[in-house]
Amino acid sequence: MTLTTPAPQTHPVGGGHLLEVDALSVEFRTEYGTVNAVNEVSWHLDKGETLAILGESGSGKSVSAQAIMGIIDTPPGYITHGQIRYRGQDMLAMSPDEQRKLRGNDIAIVFQDALSALNPVFTVGAQISEMFQVHRGMSKKDGMARAAELMDRVRIPNAKARVKDYPHQFSGGMRQRVMMAMALSLDPSVLIADEPTTALDVTVQAQIMDLLLELQKETGMGVVLITHDLGVVGEVADRIAVMYAGRIIETGTVYEVFGDPAHPYTVGLMNSVPRVDQRGQRLSPISGSPPNLADIPAGCPFHPRCPRAQDVCTQERPPLRLVVGGRRSACHFAEDVLGV
Amino acid sequence: MSELVQDPSPARTAAGEPLLRVEGLAKHFPMTLGVVRQRVVGHVKAVDGVSFTLDRGETVGLVGESGCGKSTVTKVLLALTSPTAGQVYYEGRDVFAMGKRELRELRRKIQIIFQDPYTSLNPRMTVGDIVGEPWEIHPEVLPRKGRQTAVKELLDRVGLNPDFVNRYPHQFSGGQRQRIGIARALALRPEVIVCDEPVSALDVSVQAQVINLLEDLQKEFGLSYLFIAHDLSVVRHISDRVNVMYLGRIIETGTNEQVYERPTHPYTQALLSAVPQHDPAARGQKKRIVLEGDLPSPADPPTGCHFRTRCWKAQDICSVEYPALTERGHDHPSSCHFAEVVDVVKADPEGVPGSGAVRVTD
């Protein structure tokens, strides 16, 4: 694949981006020491596009989303640096009331595990309806009617009757739809999907991703997809940010990053995954395991596992820098990796 | 390590008997109502007539979504629970007719690796004790004197530092713990290892390490793997033959190439087409079969073909007659009245219509 593939269109809002995370750092102060979950992470999202944040467990991929939604517990978590701008306004500088108005109304989130994200003692209808009651001041009755409409929109069969069911009465895929109905209830312009299909079977995953894409087309919302699944990213993302040890180590369009990765970690990930369309040659995995965020290696955090590591990598942390076109990589030898 | 290496044996016995033969295996769990007097009100047919074979040195994949009964198959196979019907033959001998001593020997020969390396290792035991414990139960395998060294050899073989024998499981990462589980399974020099979702709890980069390790060990010790997973890409990578399960039954079986490149059952086709593919350039070129609805309850499966409620090919006959798993004019058995080859992974599946219970996107 060449690098000439056209980048997806972006629609800046009022000159800036729809949602922008700028040099965000979050740390968790635990009794075992300070865990630097994300370090000066920056990314942006425009209307109608899908940004995938790709990373393994412990890479910090969910933390920036949690900071946006205000669901980082303080203590132990502290936002130590950076801005989160929604339509140009810094959310972190807003009053808690103003923040709360944005969340749910403009920015919504869907979690991985719908069973623990939903309240088991209320009907799903009541939980969706609560969105309208709290944010729109609707009556419970009107809220329930809207809940049924939404459940129909996410294609839950027999929605009118099922609003009165409890979460445990739904299958995993249907519960995920309920969560999507709740997230979409107030027509947000940003949807954060945090591993939305990880707990689901592959045919159900296909249903949910399909639905997500369709709803995105309908509403034009921007989607932040947080996942470890390269396949899902390859199928739906426009742009990718790859995270490792609390930092973004590569960004680019999905065509660029998947076609010709610019960081040895991304290369390693690609080579680690067995493919369904070919009977494998031997896999070439990355050696070792991901670092502990409380004890990130000096220099480039990837150097202990990197086949290209040189002396400079153990001493100097490579910044995320422009390599070619709009592509960024945090590797001293990004040009060599890319072969440009 | 040489003492643990076995002579390579032929894949089958002289009589053509496979190492492991499962025939018509069924396991029904009763559903009861009432507290004191329990009335049986029905049965969950978790496994309902499953047959397959495993040869020496071979890897057989068992794939299916949650609730299809693949884990229940392993439980019955290891004689951890008795089957409702059916037989399991190990080297031609009926497992469920075995006496205590024979069963004990069988359980040495068949070992298991579990999915979750966090709950399958005792947190209060050191790694050395965990890996060496099987020899307490089967002391005939290794005299007490040699055990300390053998544990270290095993750890070294699975890629762990042998000096870690006195550490506890919580001091290891997920991938390392799975290696401990593998070392424990190897301790008794088994012939068959049942791998129950061995890599699904691991990160992508670590998953590949464990897959490679399993492949190396198979070559070195001549092991046979029954590989159970829901990840179709992993099964494709590692298996020689593949069985696809749906609602307690195998619905398609064949070699790796047959099942993945020439699937004939609509469910296999839907399953394969649902696997996300990495190449973004393939977007829009591949038709995806999106199944409507959920898996029916195994307590009340549909009449006739179990898949008919979600199948776009269903005709009247499908609700009447269960399609037996036999060859239907293609090169491998399929359990569909209208079996027909559609390559959903690579090419554009022309034969899939966009109507009925299925929507074909793009």
Image: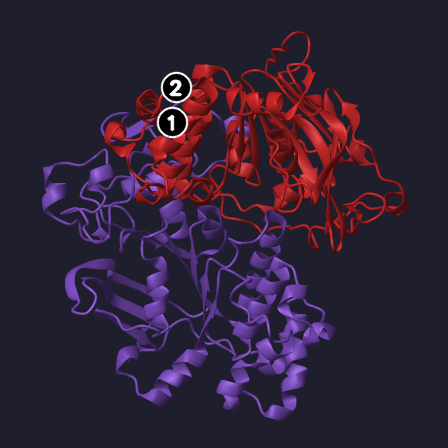
Image vertical order of residue B278 relative to residue B28, above or below: above
Q: Residue furthest top?
A: A14
Q: Tell me which label, 2 or 1, sits earlier in the chain.
A: 1
The chain ID associated with circle 1 is A
Question: Picture coordinates of residue B110 (x, y %)?
Answer: 43, 74
Q: Nearer the viewer, residue A130 or B169?
A: A130
Task: Give the purple chain's letter.
Answer: B
- Which numbered marker is on residue A138? 2
Question: Picture coordinates of residue B73 (x, y %)?
Answer: 33, 64
Q: In whole angstroms, how far apart are the C-alphas of marks 2 and 1?
A: 9 Å
In the rendered image of the structure, the colour used to display chain A is red
Q: Are marks 2 and 1 on the same chain?
A: yes
Question: Is B75 left, or right, of A105 in this rendering?
Answer: left
The chain ID associated with circle 2 is A
Question: Is B333 left, or right, of B227 in this rendering?
Answer: left
Helix, strand or loop under label 2: loop
The image's colour scheme reads by chain
Image vertical order of residue A89 relative to residue A38, above or below: above
- The answer to whether residue B360 is visible is yes
- Which numbered marker is on residue A90? none
Q: Residue at x 39, y 42 (%)?
A: B261
Question: The residue under label 1 is which amino acid type?
Answer: Ser
Question: Picture coordinates of residue B273 (x, y %)?
Answer: 39, 36
Q: Quadrant of residue B158?
A: bottom right
Question: Which quadrant does the C terminus of chain A fall into?
Answer: top right
Image vertical order of residue B33 relative to residue B251, above or below: below
How many numbered marks are there? 2
Question: The residue under label 2 is which amino acid type?
Answer: Met
Which one is closest to the eye, mark 2 or mark 1?
A: 2
Q: Nearer the viewer, residue B137 or A116?
A: A116
- The answer to whether residue A203 is visible is no
Q: Label 1 belongs to which residue? A: A129
